[in-house]
Image (cartoon, helix red, strand yellow):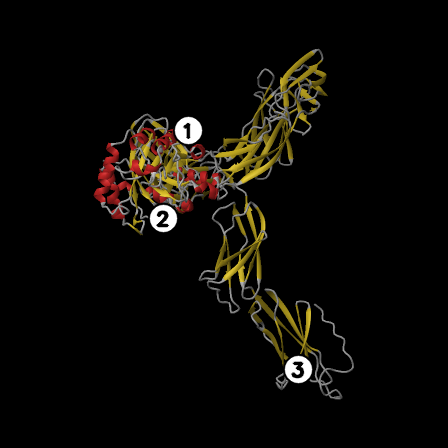
Amino acid sequence: MVLVLFLSMSLVCADENSTSTLEDVNIDANDISMYYKNGTRLSAELNDLNDNPLPDCDLVFSINNQNYTRTTNDDGKASIAINLIPGKYLANIYFLGNNQYSPSNKSVNVNVLPTISGNDLVKYYKNDSQYFATFLGSDGEVLDNEEVTFNINGVFYTRHTNQNGVAKLNINLNSGNYILTAYNPRDGFSFSNYIRVLSTINGSNLNKIYRDSHQYWVTVRDYSGNRMGFTNVEFNVNGVFYTRLADKNGNAKLNINLPAGKYIITANNLLTGELTSNTIVVNANSETKLTTQNYVFQQNDDDTIKARLTNKLNYGVSGETIDLVIGNNKYSTVTDDDGVACFNLNLKQGNYSLTFTHDANSVYGASSAKSTVETYGGIKVKIVCEDALILMNNDYEIKLYDKNNKEFANQTVYMGIGSKVLSAVTDDNGVAKFNVDVSGGIYNARIFYNGTGYKFTSNFSKISVIENTKTLIVPMTFQVNEGCGDQLFACLYVDSIVLPNEKVIIEINGVNYTRETNENGLVNITINLNAGKYSIKYYYAGNDEFLPCSNSSILTVNSRVKTTLTVLTGSTFHKNSGITYNLELKADKVLPNREITVKIGSKTYNQKTDSDGVVHIDIDDYAEGSYDVQYSFAGDKTYAPSSGSAKLAITSQIAYGYGYWVLYSNMYDLNLASLASQGTQHIFLHSYAFTAYGESSVASRIRQANNYGIKVHIWMQIAYDGGWHGISNKDGTYNYDLINSKVNQAKYYASVAGVSGVHFDYLRFGGTAYNFPKAAESINYFVKTAVDAVKSINPNCLVSAALMPEPNNMLYYDGQDYSTLTKYLDFVLPMIYKGNYNQGTAWIKSTTKWFVDNSNGAQVWSGLQAYRSDDDITRLSVSELTGDAQASLDGGARGVVMFRWGVTNFINFNSLKMS
């Protein structure tokens, strides 16, 4: 910046009438570094050469393209406040002089530091990456537990900083680009970052002709942006939903065979829940265009003539018939996927006119094209040549054969090599020798013959020309991984050109190995050494043409990372349950896209792990019985192999079931891996999860549970939702409104992908069943109707109910007819809550035994209270819960379910002994 000051004759300091010689002055000012608006001032002191302060003088502070004039005080000092936004500035301080003192100036640096810092964020839709910002006070100290504000996408959010001054804002926006602004409550400073949310599902608009080969495609990715192969994608077009399986690259296709019109298609990434929409335009018909070219062929060539048919969108049209007329001959063929029609002809010498035609049909219009073909004769010959390594100025040989495949003598043959064209004449054996007088290097030489009356013929060879015979062995491998078949490589050169077909000795650990170089001059040997460092020596003995050489290197053999294979699912499966047998491959992290071999009985599966490091083996087609399971990972260059074995039982009976009731609000709190490792096989998830999160989110969470071998049952309340609703009325009629509503809900839940069961709670009257003449009958009717409806939607969906644990009172007070209900239900869960009944563990066993002994077909799983009582929600210890669970099994129960997640300690169900 240039400071321009206009001075009047009246100077600005005292002593206006002085005519003495002007004295020099000093401006004393220092660089400053400050936090935004913390009150720091830029100060300057004006003194004469004897350090005497000069008061009442004007100093001009010039910063950020602005000038500020301040008058020095009695101490010769002046200052300005710095209220600039963070950044680095140059400040110029000017004294303009007067009739006693000369002008002077001083430059200082001003660094204004921000009180908020954060980074731009790029993340995939709804993954775990979030935005963090650090907030500071005016002194640079962090703001601890301070309420701060963020603004993104027009919405303001309030958050609190932690002890390090960091506040987090979760970014759950749709894919797109955003600006996020953070505000410091202390000084009003605002700070912005760019937020980019990447899509986990991508598609494009589609414009097509009715029933052409163009279809709608999307690509799906996981939360990390990895393409998800072999996963389901849901499409909605024209009001109809479709599910399609993506290929190995995460690309899923929906064929569009809709009538002409304009449509909106929506695709759903079922893992992330992200939707993408595109427009599809279907054109009823289209004109067409045929294009081709003129051709020139030699006689006896494979004369391929092509024409391409395109529509008005310039797409190639497949599957259409194209006719070609040449003279009196007509040929027909069908266009390929790119709209190309190929005619393979063998024409005699001559000139031909070509006419291509496509006849109109109901979708595509007629079109035609014309071109010409010229064919020429000539006697064929053959050139035989090979790649070679030769010394400069030595000869290179080729052979020439005539039409009868005889040696062709006394013919001039040419070779183009580098910038030269060499010639040679064939001898009686058809051999032509070229003296190669080019400099060293590797050449793609072209040998050709164009004798009169003969067809022009050429061939190519790679010729390596060397200028000396000095050799060199170059080690190429310095690190390998232990036990994975890594190879050590070295390359043999002569005059910087690789030397093939020569023997090299490799000395490893005192043992000599002889290997022959390949066409690329390489030798290699497989390394089977333990981890450590080794000295490697290389020797080439040379021969009559090439000089000997040797070399050495150090080879490091690294240990591979240890891996483990863990069975995520249980050992007993209910036939046709839809649950897969799952294994997780893990090292220092889960390992996706690694092939796992699993043998179950006599069947072997080779399957790659998904993005969670898990393989899923479908076992629905196995017959009942016990199977040996063997599984292995062969390892790779980084990760060591691992293997294991297990037992697997398939039964037509419902397998032993262990699990927890889970409120909807805890759906995302479950540590599925930990639960599965402790033998948890079932989750009873409250149905309000569908209201709170939506079907796609619940279905996604269910799939995650299924991946760990955990079945999910939807826990629905029948007759109580904050108030009681009778399943029948006091006049003995059934409450069909309630019954039909709950049956339809059960059918809906059974239709959701991955749901393994529907569970009825509050299937009773609130202790007043004796006032309702048809109480038990109405409950029996509801259960039979609901079970039939659920099974019609999903025959493998299990239906269960929670029952009161009062054999002598449950019919009278609750309307629960145990003998009838157990004819219809797959299993029942008597709520044997010992704390609520002031009972002990022995009561759990005896009550369970009654329910088992009196069931008319349904299995009995004991529902246990995980806390002291409804009046004291202190969690029972793991040992006490384990004892209660074992008592249930000792009483004959086939399962144990804890009420509930959030007020329970977690037991290891694997430690229980089945009765």
Label 2 and label 3: CA atoms lie apart by 78 Å
Are the residues at dot 3 and dot 1 in contact (C-beta closer than 8 Å)? Answer: no
Quarter of the rendering containing residue 888: top left
Which kind of residue does numbered mark 1 sit on? Ala
Q: Earlier in the sequence, mark 2 or mark 3?
A: 3
Position of 519 relative to 131 (above/below): above
Label 3 and label 1: CA atoms lie apart by 100 Å
Residue ID for mark 3:
25
Q: Residues within 10 Å of mark 3 (few under 14, many from 20)?
A: many
Are the residues at dot 1 and dot 2 in contact (C-beta closer than 8 Å)? Answer: no
- On screen, residue 93 versus residue 118, left or right, reads right
Residue ID for mark 1:
789
Q: In front here: 54 or 793?
A: 793
Which kind of residue does numbered mark 2 sit on? Gly
Residue ID for mark 2:
902
Quarter of the rendering containing residue 723: top left
Quarter of the rendering containing residue 514: top left
Q: Earlier in the sequence, mark 1 or mark 2?
A: 1
Residue 508 visible somewhere in the drawing: no
Which kind of residue does numbered mark 3 sit on? Val
Helix, strand or loop for disc 2: loop
Q: Position of residue 317 (x, y in %)?
A: 64, 24
Helix, strand or loop for disc 1: helix
Q: Position of residue 717 (x, y in %)?
A: 40, 39
- On screen, residue 339 versus residue 664, left or right, reads right
Q: Earlier in the sequence, mark 3 or mark 1?
A: 3
Q: Residues within 10 Å of mark 2 (few under 14, many from 20)?
A: some
